[in-house]
Image: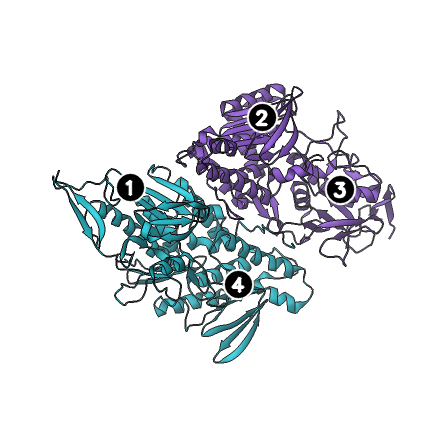
Chain colours: A purple, B cyan
C-alpha cells in the first residue's frame, strides 16, 4: 500500500492512501491503528459545543471540567435575583454527552501543560499525565477587579453558581435587615444597591433588582417599603451597553430610569470599602453608601492562561487572554486551539478582539470540532470567521434591547426575541420547558419563585 | 356598660358585653383597646397554617423563623436525589403571608421564654424581649442519632435544604470518584449506599436512589455501570413502614427488591465509622462497607423543647417532645400551644403519641388558630382530634403505597394519589405548576433534572 503522509507546519495532518481516500483511524495521532485523542478542557459553551460535534466521530474525546455540569451563564443573574434555581440553568455534562460513547468526562482541573510531550497535568491526578493529539482550551473567565483584588471582600461577583447564590443571599438579606433596623440612615444604606459596570450584566442585574424590589416584594414587609429601594448603576464610560448602537444605549437608559434605577455614567470607581464607594465624577470625588455592592464590571480569563502563556512564551492581553492565530490555534502549535473567553481573537475586520460572549464561544467550539474533522479528512481548514447574529440584553420584564441584522429593537418585541433566543440555547430539553414556564409565570404575576436565603445562615 | 370577664383555668378568656355580644378588641390581651398579640415560633406546616388562618383576623401576629422560607419537607428527598431544586419546594414566608397586614415575619430564633412576663427571648435581639398574649411553638425537629452523636460525621441527614444539597453532593460525587477509581474493591465500596431507617423517608430515599442509579445515570459513565450500584435499606424492626398495615409493608418491600434494593430488616446498627457500618443480625455482628451512609432513622424535637421544659418543670419524651394537654397547651398554661414535631400529643384512643408527620402539624396549626378565634368570641374550645386521612409513601416512579380510608393501595394508583396529595399541599401556586411539570417530565423520561454538585468543590 502506497501512503503519503501530509504535513503542515511540521504538524502531522493526515495520510492519503493509495486508493485516493484518507485513512482516518491513524490520522492526527501519528500512530496507525490508534484513534486520535482530542482533549477538551472546560465544559462551557466553547468546550461543550466542540464535544457535542465530535460525538460519535472517529476520535476519542476527553472533556475535563472542575464541575459536573454545564452552566448557562447568560441567565445566572436570574439565579442571583431569585427568579430561577441553579438546576434550571444547568445540565449535567455526562448527561448531555451520554449518547456519545467516544466521549468521556473527567472531573478535574488542568494545572499545567508539557507541550513537548503533548501532555497536560491535572490537579487531582498528579502522577498520571493526560496525552493529547489535539488540545482544545476553553476554560472561560472569572470575576476580575483590575488590580484591586481587595475590592473582592466588599463586593459580590457573578460568574459561578456559588457566587450567584451568595449574591441572592445578599440581595434578600438586606431587606430582612432593613425591616428591623431602627436607625433610618442605616436602613437607607441597607436599601441601596450599587451595581458597578454598565455592560449587559450590569444592565440586566439593575433591571432584575428593580423588578424584585418594586413588584415581587410588594406587601412583603411591614416596616419598610421595598419600592423605596435605591438602585444605582455605575458606569465609567459615557453610556451603557457600549458595544450597542447609541440609540439602544439611550433606550436602555430611559427604560431603566423609568423603572427607578439611577444611571450614573462617566462615573469612575476609585475606591470600594465596607458598604461604601468613592466615585470620581467630573474630576470631583463623590461618596456613596450602599449596603450591597454588586460587581459587573469585568472578568479575566481563567488562570490557566498564565501557565500556557509562560510555557509558550506568549504575552497575555490586559484581560489575561491568550492571543490566537486566525484558526484559533497558538502560534506554531496547530495542535492547540484556544476558544471563547480564554482567547484573544483579533483577526477581525477592525482588528478588535472578539467580545467574551456566548455566541463567540459557541461558534469557536463548533469551528474547533470542524477543524478536527477536516484534518481527519485531510481537508484544508479555513480561518475562523465570527458571524455576529446581533446583540441582545434584557432590561426588565417585557423590556429588552436588540441589535439584530441591522434591526434595532427595544421594548416588548426585543424581550420576546431575547426570551426565544435564550430558551433556544438552553441545553437539556426539560430545562427549557421549566424555564419557559417560570418566565411565563413571572410574566403574568411578577413573582420571583426562588427567593430562598440558603447557605451560611442569615445571621451566621 | 355591664361587662363580665370570663376566666377559665385562671386564664382570661373573654369579655361578654351588656348587649350579649363579645367585645373582641380587648379579648385575650387583657387590656381593653389593645389587640391581642399571637406569637408563632416556626414557619413549618404547623406555624404557617396557624398564621394563614389568623390572617386578617382581629389579632396581631408575629411569625418567627430562622429561615425566610417555608420548606415542603416531604419532598426534600427529591432535592437530595437531584429531581427537584430547593426553590421548587420552598415558598418565601413573607410572600405567602403578604396579603395579611396583621402578620409580621421576623427572621430570628427563639432561645428562651419568661413565662411570668409572657415574653420570649430571641437570639439576635438580646435586649428586646417579645411579649405575647398567646404563644404557638412549632419549631419542628432535627436529625437525631439517639445518643450516637459521633455518627453524624459519617452519615448524611435530611432535614434542611443544606443537608439535602449536601446529600445530593455525596450521592453524585461517589459515582464520579468510582468512575476513576482503579481499585475494584474501593470502587465497590463507593458504589454502595446504606440507608439507615425503614420508615417513609428511608423507603423513599432507597427508591429514588435506585431510580437514579438504574435509569437516570444510564450511559453517563464509561468505566463503571451505575446499574451495579448496591443499595441497602437497613431497618431494626421486623418490617418496613411499621405504621402501615402489614400487607403494604410487604408490598413496599417487594417493589424495592424488584428495583434492586437489598432490604435488611431486623438488622440493628451497632456502630458507624468512616464508610463502614456494623450491624447486629440474629445476635451476630455483620460488617458492611458503604461509600455513602444516609441517615433516615430518626429525628428529635428541636432544642427549644429542652428550654421550655426546664422553665415549666416538664419532662420531655425520648424524642425530646413536650407533652401537651388535649387542647395542645402546656399544662397550666393555656396561653402556650405546642404543635407538630415539637409536641407529644398522647390524647389518642390508643394512648400512643401522634406521629411526626405533616398532616398532624397542619391540623394542629389550624386547630391553634381556631382556638385563638374561639377564645376571642368567648366560645369553648373542644379538644384537638386528629383526623387520620391515611398514610402515603412513594417507593419509586409509578410505585407507591397508600393506606387511605380503609383502602390499601399499591402501585400506579397509589403513586397518582401520592402525587396529587403532595401537589395539593405545596404552598405557592407557581411551585405546584413547576413541580408537576418536573414530575411529568421525570415520569416520561426517567431523567433527573437537578443533578448539580454544588457547594464546596468536588475535590475541596
Residue at the image point whose x is 50% and y is 51% from the top: B445
As rendered, which of B59 and A379 lies closer to the eye? B59
The residue at which mark 3 appears reads as A305
Crowd class of label 3 (few under 14; some 14 to 19; many from 20; radius 10 Å): many
Q: Which image quarter is the C terminus of chain B in?
A: bottom right
The residue at which mark 2 appears reads as A402
Q: Is residue A241 above or below residue B233?
A: above
Q: CA distance from mark 1 to mark 3?
A: 63 Å
Provide the secondary structure element on which disc 2 rests: strand
Ranked by sequence position, the earlier of labels 1 and 4 is 1
Residue at the image point whose x is 56% and y is 25% from the top: A401
Which picture quadrant has residue A331? top right
Q: CA distance from mark 2 to mark 3?
A: 32 Å
The residue at which mark 1 appears reads as B59
- What is the number of the mark on residue B152? 4
Provide the secondary structure element on which disc 4 rests: helix
Chain of the residue under label 3: A
Whole-percent x, y for residue B394 in the image: 42, 59
| Dot 2 and dot 4 residues touching (CB under 8 Å) | no
Q: Are marks 2 and 3 on the same chain?
A: yes
Q: Is residue A387 above or below residue B435?
A: above
Chain of the residue under label 4: B
Amino acid at each position: 500500500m502506497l501512503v503519503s503522509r501530509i504535513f503542515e507546519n511540521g504538524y502531522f495532518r493526515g495520510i492519503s492512501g493509495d486508493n485516493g481516500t484518507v485513512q482516518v483511524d491513524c490520522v492526527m495521532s501519528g500512530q496507525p491503528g490508534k484513534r486520535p485523542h482530542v482533549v477538551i478542557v472546560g465544559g462551557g459553551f466553547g468546550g461543550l459545543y466542540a464535544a457535542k460535534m465530535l460525538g460519535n466521530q472517529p476520535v476519542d474525546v476527553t472533556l475535563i471540567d472542575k464541575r459536573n455540569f454545564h452552566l448557562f451563564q447568560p441567565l445566572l443573574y436570574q439565579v442571583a435575583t431569585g427568579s430561577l434555581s441553579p438546576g434550571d440553568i444547568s445540565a449535567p455534562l455526562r448527561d448531555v454527552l451520554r449518547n456519545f460513547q467516544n466521549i468521556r468526562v473527567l472531573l478535574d482541573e488542568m494545572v499545567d501543560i508539557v507541550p513537548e510531550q503533548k501532555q497536560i497535568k491535572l490537579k487531582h491526578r498528579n502522577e498520571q499525565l493526560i496525552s493529547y493529539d489535539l488540545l482544545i482550551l476553553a476554560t472561560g473567565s472569572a470575576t476580575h477587579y483590575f488590580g484591586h483584588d481587595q475590592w473582592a471582600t466588599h463586593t459580590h461577583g457573578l460568574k459561578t453558581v456559588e457566587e450567584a447564590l451568595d449574591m441572592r443571599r445578599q440581595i434578600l438579606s438586606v431587606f430582612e435587615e432593613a425591616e428591623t433596623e431602627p436607625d433610618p440612615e442605616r436602613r437607607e444604606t441597607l436599601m441601596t444597591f450599587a451595581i458597578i459596570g454598565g455592560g449587559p450584566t450590569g444592565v440586566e442585574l439593575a433591571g432584575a433588582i428593580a423588578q424584585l424590589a418594586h413588584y415581587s416584594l410588594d406587601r412583603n414587609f411591614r416596616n419598610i417599603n421595598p419600592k423605596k429601594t435605591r438602585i444605582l448603576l455605575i458606569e465609567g464610560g459615557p453610556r451603557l451597553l457600549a458595544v450597542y448602537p447609541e440609540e439602544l444605549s439611550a433606550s436602555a437608559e430611559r427604560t431603566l430610569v423609568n423603572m427607578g434605577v439611577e444611571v450614573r455614567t462617566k462615573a469612575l470607581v476609585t475606591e470600594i470599602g465596607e458598604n461604601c464607594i468613592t466615585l470620581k465624577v467630573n474630576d470631583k470625588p463623590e461618596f456613596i453608601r450602599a449596603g450591597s455592592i454588586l460587581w459587573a464590571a469585568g472578568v479575566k480569563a481563567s488562570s490557566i492562561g498564565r501557565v500556557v502563556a509562560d510555557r509558550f512564551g506568549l504575552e497575555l492581553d490586559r484581560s489575561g487572554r491568550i492571543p490566537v492565530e486566525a484558526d484559533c490555534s497558538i502560534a506554531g502549535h496547530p495542535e492547540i486551539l484556544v476558544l471563547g473567553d480564554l482567547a484573544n481573537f483579533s483577526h477581525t475586520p477592525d482588528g478588535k478582539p472578539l467580545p467574551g460572549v456566548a455566541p463567540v464561544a459557541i461558534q469557536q467550539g463548533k469551528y474547533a470540532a470542524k477543524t478536527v474533522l477536516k484534518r481527519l479528512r485531510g481537508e484544508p481548514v479555513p480561518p475562523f470567521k465570527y458571524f455576529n447574529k446581533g446583540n441582545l440584553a434584557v432590561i426588565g420584564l417585557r423590556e429588552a434591547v436588540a441589535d439584530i441584522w441591522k434591526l434595532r429593537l427595544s421594548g416588548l418585541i426585543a424581550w420576546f426575541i431575547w426570551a426565544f433566543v435564550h430558551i433556544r440555547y438552553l441545553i437539556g430539553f426539560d430545562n427549557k420547558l421549566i424555564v419557559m414556564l417560570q418566565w411565563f409565570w413571572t410574566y403574568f404575576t411578577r413573582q420571583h419563585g426562588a427567593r430562598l436565603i440558603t447557605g451560611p445562615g442569615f445571621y451566621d
